[in-house]
Image (cartoon, helix red, strand yellow):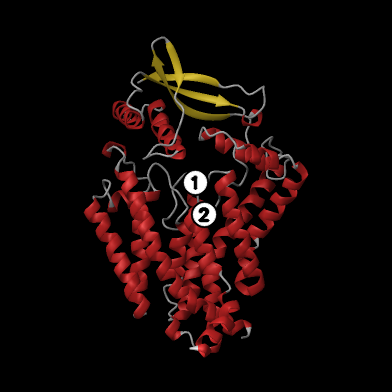
């Protein structure tokens, strides 16, 4: 397969992977919902106006369960019946489902990538992707996902530039022990003792400066993966490891985003010969 | 229809950049899009960092309440909620109601915390992990 073909081929698998992942994600949200349901009713603080509008109080199990269930049914139907309108519904429902889970007291962004993913895939139905230049629209799908990381990376460059130009005494990512400070501060705020193995790793001070700069460059340039399959696979591994790092070293739990990156960016075409052989042997 | 994916991308990008502008002006993001301005500098990049913390008076001792994850709260939840009501109480925003909420919240964390005092702590994050690390605290109010 050439680049154009394999890009479309990969998306056709992503389409189905997103349905299965979606069902799993809904289940996780149900458990999160149950946990927050145990909080006293008085301390529900919707952060955004849209949340206050849709859920003026924390939703009951029947209401929230009903929304979860309808979303699950639609995801399931779209496995067999590809439909633009149902895709729009999925996007809206997933955005709504995330509200009471992630937007109490502040906005948690660990599900935003997933919501953007369902948004970007609204108009991409495998059955209609048969023209030669359809790979372009798949590139936009990747671009939509990766732009979020690129914005995060570029804003780090801007943060560094701003502090250097203004000559502030703030620590920037270029400073020695910047990553360590980031870890210590986040652990301190959460009252958790920093594990010794993490402190030991931070003793390689120069290595961490290089790692940090490397990380910011790859993060900022991750959008380029939309145009090059090999770079996309590299970005996939990078983002997976990056999320793993933030989980252990910064206590930022992007568990679902991490899995989503794997599912959406995976080079499924490398398995193509396997699929074919399997079919031949049947 | 697939060609509209292009417009979805530009919509998403536009709303992200708009969110960035609005947040910069002190507003809030356009959900479910976001500016993605995360960790532009490391946490603890300034010389002084502030944090609202609750203390509990037990007999004659004032003990700093620590965050331990429970069945319903993790450490980040505990820090976030304490900070949220702490700030409102300091600003005297709906003072009575927010003190009440803070108490209800603490009760659900650990019912033994009954004599609460709210402090605003400040410290130099760059001293974390060093012997020179020291917390200064400012009394906000007894709850």
Residue A233 percent location from the top left of the image? 62, 69
Residue A118 percent location from the top left of the image? 43, 67
The residue furthest top is B60
Residue A77 percent location from the top left of the image? 32, 75
Residue B95 percent location from the top left of the image? 32, 26
Position of A241 relative to B130 (above/below): below
Q: Chain of mark 2?
A: B
Position of A2 relative to B96 (above/below): below
Identify the residue shown where x is 29% and y is 69%. A73
Q: Earlier in the sequence, mark 1 or mark 2?
A: 1
Position of A220 relative to B79 (above/below): below
Tell me the CA gap for discs 1 and 2. Answer: 13 Å
**Residue at image mark 1:** B25
**Residue at image mark 2:** B35
Residue A68 in which image quadrant: bottom left
Point out the image quarter for the N terminus of chain A.
Answer: bottom right
The residue furthest front is A281
């Amino acid at each position: 397969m050439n680049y154009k073909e394999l890009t479309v081929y990969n998306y056709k698998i992503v389409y189905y992977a997103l349905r299965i992942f979606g069902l799993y994600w809904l289940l996780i949200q149900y458990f999160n919902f149950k946990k927050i349901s145990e909080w006293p009713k008085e301390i529900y603080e919707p952060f955004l106006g849209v949340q206050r509008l849709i859920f003026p109080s924390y939703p009951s199990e029947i209401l929230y369960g009903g929304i979860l269930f309808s979303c699950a049914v639609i995801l399931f139907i779209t496995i067999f019946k590809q439909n633009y309108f149902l895709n729009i519904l999925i996007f809206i429902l997933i955005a709504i489902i995330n509200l009471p889970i992630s937007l109490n007291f502040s906005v948690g962004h660990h599900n935003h990538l997933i919501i953007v993913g369902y948004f970007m895939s609204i108009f991409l139905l495998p059955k209609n992707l048969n023209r030669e230049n359809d790979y372009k629209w798949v590139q936009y799908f990747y671009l939509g996902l990766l732009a979020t990381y690129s914005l995060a990376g570029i804003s780090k460059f801007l943060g560094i530039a701003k502090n250097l130009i203004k000559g502030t005494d703030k620590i920037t990512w270029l400073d020695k022990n910047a990553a360590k400070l980031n870890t210590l501060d986040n652990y301190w705020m959460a009252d958790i003792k920093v594990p010794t193995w993490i402190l030991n790793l931070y003793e390689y001070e120069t290595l961490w400066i290089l790692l940090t700069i490397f990380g910011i460059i790859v993060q900022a340039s991750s959008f380029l993966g939309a145009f090059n399959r090999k770079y996309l696979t590299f970005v996939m591994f990078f983002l997976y490891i990056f999320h793993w790092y933030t989980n252990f070293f910064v206590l930022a739990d992007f568990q679902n985003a991490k899995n989503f990156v794997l599912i959406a960016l995976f080079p499924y075409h490398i398995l193509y010969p396997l699929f074919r052989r399997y079919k031949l042997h049947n | 229809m697939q060609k509209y994916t292009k417009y979805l991308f530009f919509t998403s990008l536009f709303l992200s950049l708009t969110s960035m502008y609005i947040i910069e002006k002190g507003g809030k993001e356009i959900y479910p899009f976001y500016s993605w301005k995360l960790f532009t500098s490391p946490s603890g990049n300034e010389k002084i960092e502030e944090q609202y913390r609750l203390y509990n008076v037990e007999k004659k001792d004032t003990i700093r309440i620590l965050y331990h994850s429970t069945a319903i709260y993790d450490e980040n939840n505990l820090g976030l909620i304490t900070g949220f009501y702490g700030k409102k109480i300091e600003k005297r925003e709906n003072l009575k109601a927010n003190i009440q909420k803070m108490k209800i919240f603490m009760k659900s964390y650990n019912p033994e915390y009954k004599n609460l005092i709210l402090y605003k702590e400040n410290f130099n994050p760059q001293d974390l992990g060093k012997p020179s690390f020291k917390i200064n605290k400012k009394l906000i109010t007894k709850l």
